[in-house]
Amino acid sequence: MPYLLKTEPTVYSFADLQRDKSTLWDGVSNPTAVKNLREMTPGTKLIIYETGEKKSAVGTATVVSVDTKDPKNPAVNIRAGKPLPNPVTLAQIKSQKLFADSPLVRIGRLSVVPLTEAQYNSLVS
């Protein structure tokens, strides 16, 4: 199952991830978001979504490793992928029937959001 990871670009942007090539995804405290991190496995496909002024899906990444020894703070290492050909704004996402039931639309504060394969493919195309 793919996931969407939200980040505040003034704190850590997709450009930062591309520069660093990989990073530990941390700072997640919402229990549902933490649960979603724990469910990831190496190879899980990710969409990076920048909040703030942009509010748009901007790039891809992949899970490299997951360490769940500390269940309240799983260590998820991710590797940068490519920028999306065209960033997809939240308004565009909300306008698609495909996302009507998505936690991305229903639970706006959730920072780690599961996606269906169809939703992932819609964002990267």
Image (cartoon, helix red, strand yellow):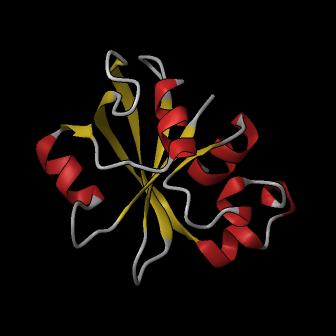
Percent of width and height locating residue 81: 34, 40
Q: Quadrant of the N terminus?
A: top right
| Foreground residue among 23 and 112 | 112
At horizontal 44% and vertical 19% (from top left) the residue drawn is 43
| Foreground residue among 72 and 77 | 72
At horizontal 41% and vertical 17% (from top left) the residue drawn is 42
Percent of width and height locating residue 63: 38, 27
At horizontal 32% and vertical 15% (from top left) the residue drawn is 69
At horizontal 71% and vertical 65% (from top left) the residue drawn is 105
121 relative to 45 in the view: left or right: right
Q: Is residue 56 above or below residue 120?
A: below
Q: Is residue 10 above or below residue 112?
A: below
Q: Is residue 66 above or below residue 6?
A: above
The residue at the far bottom in this view is 53
31 relative to 75 in the view: left or right: right
| Foreground residue among 68 and 47 | 68
37 relative to 114 in the view: left or right: left
Q: Is residue 90 above or below residue 4?
A: below
53 relative to 17 in the view: left or right: right
Percent of width and height locating residue 106: 74, 63
Percent of width and height locating residue 54: 43, 78
Picture mark count? 0
